[in-house]
Image: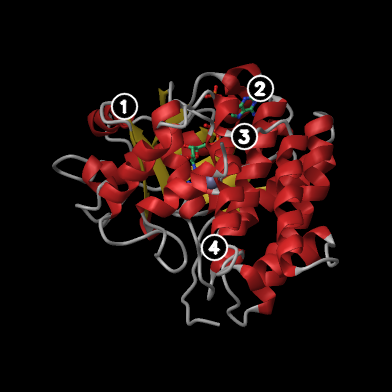
Amino acid sequence: MNNFQFKNPTKILFGKGQIANINQELHPNQKILLLYGGGSIKKNGVYDQVMQALKGYNITEFSGIEANPRYETCLKAINLVKKESIEFILAVGGGSVIDAAKFIAAGVYIETDPWMILSDRAKVKQALPIGTVLTLPATASEMNGNAVITRDATKEKLAFGSPHVYPQFSVLDPETTLSLPARQIANGVVDAFSHVIEQYLTYPADAPLQDRMAEGILLTLIEEGPKTYADPKDYTSRANIMWACTMALNGVIGVGVPQDWATHRIGHELTALFEIDHARTLAIVMPGIFQHKSEQKKHKLLQYASRIWNITEGSEEEIIHQAVDKTIAFFESLGIKTKLKDYDVNPEAINEIAERLAKRNGEIGLGEHQDIHQQDVVKILEYAL
Ligand code: NZQ
Ligand code: ZN
């Protein structure tokens, strides 16, 4: 196992009715920005619960954070935060609203252009405190220090991470997810699945506990995902999915082991160029990564095949092939297609994507060995034709 340091400061308030307790986490005199998206929280009663809990608190609202939150919108929120001397940001929504909150919280302190945080030209040295009420289990943004922001003008989708933007607290009430359309439930399950895969399916690092925890999350997603997809009223399966998604990317399973974020990095280009839902881009890319890197990932692919899908018969090549097929079948069982043509993406786009990534990364390749370069990206995406 590799050396590591680990700290996750986010307090979790899990379960029914926990929104009522957020006032215990906030000072009545603090100036709070209530940040939310396109209005789902007004339809499902979450907004009312938050306002009830914060009766008498000093609240300014900013709504309209998009799915795949836009830099341009966040800039408007940053101006409002400065104008109103906001002291705390409460994000209520899915990963997009929470990511926007993190960027706004850090961007307030960047004197020039906050985009520099994303283009790696400015380091986050401080940020306003954040709290969240999560309404969509998927990203684990509610318990990590990462955010992904899209810039419309340049069609760029970039991520940053900082210990300063971990939420101080996050409410995970599975009841808030009962209003989610099946499409978003499926997205959440596949996103979390990919987060686990990218911290697990690399090469052995003598870290059996991280492996077993990762496998526990994968199996939970495989068992509970279809239940919650099929039955929007099943509180128990939603609760299990909610916690599994948080655990998938709150840092615990990734300590001391190699990580491979190539699926996400390629996927972000697909979203930036074609507006494909984040999770769906991962379902397009991941099978190609498995196949293109089957030699380097062989040991872990065989472990994945046996422990997750009970595949043990056949040659190594056949076993890996079956594991890829099982993974694709799982995604498709949740209504998530895995081919580029399913999203009307022309084969010509493959070169453009590979070129954009190569330009951004320079000499450094993607993946756990940093050896996925332009031509590899082409081959990986060709599996999705
Ligand atoms: O905007 P509203 O009206 O709230 O509607 C949202 C949005 O349209 C809706 N929704 C959310 N909760 C709902 C609901 N509808 C009904 N009932 C509810 N309870 O769902 C739609 C999608 O929401 P969004 O927040 O965009 O989804 P998700 O949580 O999947 O977040 C995706 C974003 O997170 C980034 C992605 O790249 C993408 O931009 N990621 C962030 C990560 C992180 N911070 O660690 C890691 C991930 O890998 C990911 O990249
Ligand atoms: Zn993701």
For the residue with label 1, is its CB less than 8 Å from the closest atom of ligand 1?
Answer: no
Amino acid type at image mark 2:
Gly
Q: Residues within 10 Å of mark 4 (few under 14, many from 20)?
A: some
From the image, state whether disc 2 or disc 4 is nearer to you. 4
Quadrant of the rendered image containing residue 251:
bottom right
What residue would you read off at disc 4?
251
Q: Which disc, if any, is residue 303?
A: none
**Between 383 and 287, the one nearer to me in the picture:** 383
Where's residue 77, x and y in %?
32, 29
Left or right? Give the position of 240 relative to 277. right
What residue would you read off at disc 1?
152
Q: Residue at x 26, y 26 (%)?
A: 153
Q: Which residue is drawn at 65% across and 33% down?
A: 337
Q: Which residue is drawn at 42% across and 46% down?
A: 147
What residue would you read off at disc 3?
135
Q: Which residue is drawn at 57% across and 27% down?
A: 341
Q: Quadrant of the N terminus?
A: bottom right
Whole-angstrom CA distance, mark 1 to mark 4, is 30 Å
Amino acid type at image mark 3:
Thr
Quadrant of the rendered image containing residue 212:
bottom right
Whole-angstrom CA distance, mark 2 to mark 4, is 31 Å
**Disc 2 + disc 1, Cβ < 8 Å:** no
Q: How crowded is mark 2: few (under 14 residues within 10 Å), some or many (20 or more)?
A: few
**Disc 2 + disc 3, Cβ < 8 Å:** no
Give the secondary structure at mark 2: loop
What residue would you read off at disc 2?
45
Where's residue 64, x and y in %?
43, 21
**Between 255 and 100, the one nearer to me in the picture:** 255
Disc with the residue nearer the chain's start (2 vs 1): 2
